[in-house]
Image (spheres, rainbow, N blue to C red):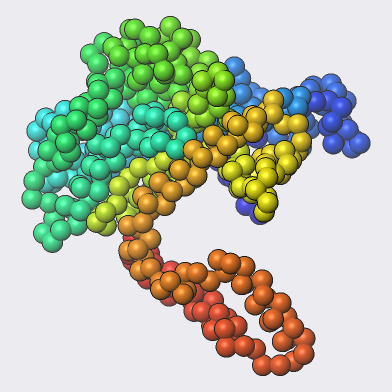
Amino acid sequence: MCLPFSPWSQALRPDIEPTADASLRTCFRDELETGVGSGRAYLVDSTPEAYALVREPLFRRPCQVSSGDCPFGTAYEEADTFFNVCNTLALIAEASLKTQHADATPADCISWLGACIDRFVMGIEPSSGHSEGYEGAWAADAVLLINCLYPSCTVVGELALLPAFAKAVPLVQQELHKPGGPTRRFRLPDLVSKEEWSAAHDFWSAFSRKDYGRCAWRAGLAPFLTLLLTHKGSHKTSPEVIEQFRSSFETAVRAVWLVHSRDGIARPPDGSPAADAMSPGHISRHHIDPVFVGDEDQGTLQRGALIGIKPHSYRQILAEMLGSHIKGVECNVALNSGGMALRVSSDPTILEADGKERTDKSISPTQTEGDEAAYGTRRNKINGAEMQKSAWDTNALLGKALYTAIEKPHSADIRSRGEFGFSQFFQMEAASTAESEQLPSASYSFAKSAIHAASDPGVAKLVNACL
């Protein structure tokens, strides 16, 4: 078992239905800590409320007070990714400037990174401080990560990031990996089509506005990045430092309003989850929370959170960035969240052998009956399943270049192993053979040797060299 070791790890007590608290039969030092007294589950290792960064009123903790509550419909995972991406951006800012100016302050580093991205996106000639092309490489990586903080699309099954940023990182890295290194300075307008650059320009314009209060970079994201670099991950925290981090983190999250607003003054356009918020300060929990299951009657689409992406989606982006020098790689991800992410066998599009619909319990993400209030009707579950399966297909194709760079596809005979349930037959055959003390079959011997070969540490070294 591995537990997180960080000054910012947290596990808040979830809201529950008091009479369903399984810890009621245990002893308590303080009876006020019981579910009946607090309305929350009792966790011996829970984070004190005052020490938590992600908490109410902006973020909703997991809760299930009634059968109509979906404890998975929170932005907790996306907030986790948001925090991690910010740390990565802060380190990029430090690395990109301190190679030239070792005495640069955290504020200098963050300001420098913003200027690098601005020159890269707007097509301005880069500064002469860095070697040929490397400033553009820092900027391409950073702006892609910023797009992960504020996704351009939140609908499940759709690509989360803008094509210009998704394509720029591989194009830059492939140029950097050429013999002799880069021969030119990188500018986004030179790397992508005019339409793709226009969408990227519109996105970054929210971070380059002259008015401080309307600028998503200076008024929203940069102060938090500066604070992260200043603190440097130290475990020496105080209530005042925690409050400072919480306030700065929430300000960075609420800056999503400035990203969605056309000019930083008008409300975000219709269709944006933040459309009814009048200002960044009016961004609330219901704006940023994901929609776990859509509602066809109300016209609500199943979507992710307004900020950040799921941890598994972020891992995919990082893997693509790591292998972006490989031809065919594009750094993007189709958002995937919903019932099938909890239990893939709950797929409501799968029917019985006779063509009849499966029971309500079998298509429930939590394998319970009467879950429509929390997890949607059968029709809405089918819509969500189709969106999620589309996301899986898209992500498999996005990862194709990485997979095939590590190992070329096997023959059809090898790929079809176990597809029709033959593996169960072989398992029973192997067990029967071992029981009767007979020699194992040729297929068993081959499979055993293949597993041993795959577990060789040298294989990992070969795979890592491909990435």
User: Which of 283 and 182 lies nearest the eye of the viewer?
Assistant: 283
Q: Nearer the viewer, residue 40 or 155?
A: 155
Q: Is residue 37 visible?
A: yes
* Quadrant of the rendering where the C terminus is positioned: bottom left
207 horizontally vs 192: left or right = right
Residue at horizontal 13%, vertical 55%? 181
Note whether 160 is above or below 362 in the view shown.
above
Q: What is the residue that sits farthest to the front in this orientation?
A: 354
- Percent x, y of residue 261: 34, 14
Q: Which residue is located at x 89 percent, y 37 percent?
A: 26
Task: Tell me if 408 is positioned left or right of 99 in this view.
Answer: right
Asked whether residue 238 appears in the rendered view, the answer is: no
Q: What percent of the width, then of the height, locates residue 310?
A: 49, 38
Give the total of numbered labels.
0
Looking at the picture, does residue 181 appear above or below residue 418? Answer: above
| Quadrant into which the N terminus falls | bottom right
Nearer to me, 112 or 64: 64
Residue 347: image location, x then y, percent? 61, 44
Quadrant in the rendering for residue 125:
top left
Q: Position of residue 299 (x, y in %)?
A: 51, 20
The structure residue drawn at horizontal position 54% and vertical position 76%, both measured from the top left corner, is: 451
Residue at 59% from the left image edge and 30% from the top image edge: 380
Foreground pick, 218 / 389: 389
The quarter holding residue 134 reads top left
